[in-house]
Image: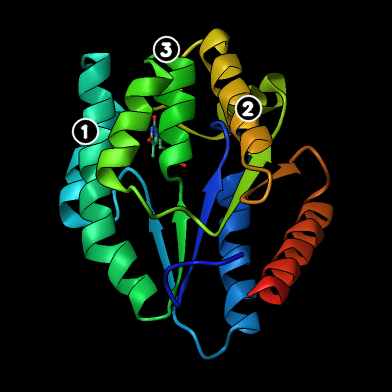
Amino acid sequence: MTSMYPGYFISFEGIDGAGKSTHIEAFQKLMQERYPNREVVMTREPGGTPLGEQLRGLLLDAPMNLETEALLMFAARREHIAQVIEPALMAGKIVISDRFTDASFAYQGGGRKLSLDKLSALEQWVHPHLQPDLTLLFDVPLEVARQRLDAHRTLDKFEKEKSDFFTATRDVYLQRAAQFPNRIRVIDSTQPLETVRQEVENIIQQLIQQR
Ligand code: TYD
C-alpha cells in the first residue's frame, strides 16, 4: 500500500448498531502499542473540528433537503481534512476517524438515494487524492443492528430511519467493499467480541507489513 503521506489514515464504518463504537477504543490502544513512537489522533465525522461539530448538531437533528445534507457532510469534511486530517498525516501521525466518505455514499447515496455520480463529484472536489489507507467495515444483518440500537439510547435522525433505508445503506457499503477490496476490510460483527478483536489485530499486522 502506498500513500502520499508519512502517516496512516484509518476509517471505521458500518450501519448504526453494527458495533463500530465498541471496537474503536480497543483499536486505538492496539495501534498505540504497535506504534509507540507515533501519535494516534482519534476523530469523527460529521465533526472533528469546532465548525464540524456544529454542523454535526444540525445534521443529526434538523430536517433538511437531501442535497443540503450531502453538501453539509462534505463541507464539514473539507474543514476536517484541512484542520485535522492532512496536518496530522503530514506529521506522520496515525489518524483514526469514526466514519469518512464511504458513509456519505452509503447513507446519502444508498439510504437517501442521492445519485452516486453527484457524490463522486463532491468527493473529487473535496478530496481528489486523499483516501484512507485502511477502512474497517463492521457488518451485521439489519435485525441485529436494530436490536443493538434499541437496547441503549435515544435515536438521532438517521437512527430513526426505517429498515429499507438501512438495507440500502448496508448494500452500498458492501458494494464499495467489493469495489475497493484492498482498502476496505469487511468484519463480520455478529461474531463474539474477542473474535472480532483478533480479526482486527490480524488486519493491523498486515497493514504494518505492507508499509
Ligand atoms: P455515528 O457515527 O453513528 O455516531 P454515534 O455512534 O454517536 O451515533 O453517527 C453519525 C451519523 O451520521 C450516522 O447515522 C451516519 C451519518 N452520516 C451520514 O449520513 N453521512 C456521512 O457522510 C457521515 C460521515 C455520517
Residue 188 sits in quarter: top right
Q: Is residue 46 above or below residue 116?
A: below
Q: Is residue 192 left or right of residue 182?
A: right
Q: Earlier in the sequence, mark 2 or mark 1?
A: 1
Q: Earlier in the sequence, mark 2 or mark 3?
A: 3
Q: Quadrant of the C terminus?
A: bottom right
Q: Identify the amino acid type marked 1.
A: Leu
Residue 113 numbered mark, or none: 3
Looking at the picture, how far across and down is residue 68, in whole percent? 20, 22
Looking at the picture, how far across and down is residue 128, in whole percent? 33, 47
User: Label 1, on which residue?
Assistant: 72
Looking at the picture, how far across and down is residue 160, in whole percent? 44, 18
Q: CA distance from mark 2 to mark 3?
A: 15 Å
Question: Disc 2 or disc 1, which is closer to the eye?
Answer: 2
Q: Which residue corresponds to the image point at 28% horizontal and 57% vertical from the top-left? A: 81
Q: Quadrant of the N terminus?
A: bottom right
Asked if residue 110 can be seen in this view, the reply is: yes
Colouring method of the image: rainbow
Q: Is residue 125 left or right of residue 95?
A: left
User: Crowding near pointer 3: few (<14 within 10 Å), some, many (20+)?
Assistant: some
Q: Identify the amino acid type marked 3.
A: Lys
User: Crowding near pointer 2: few (<14 within 10 Å), some, many (20+)?
Assistant: few
Q: Earlier in the sequence, mark 3 or mark 1?
A: 1
User: Label 2, on which residue?
Assistant: 175
User: Do tag 3 and tag 1 residues touch (Cβ < 8 Å)?
Assistant: no
Residue 86 numbered mark, or none: none
Q: CA distance from mark 3 to mark 1?
A: 16 Å
Q: Identify the amino acid type marked 2.
A: Gln
**Residue at the outermost bottom position:** 37
Q: Is mark 3 within 8 Å of ligand 1?
A: no
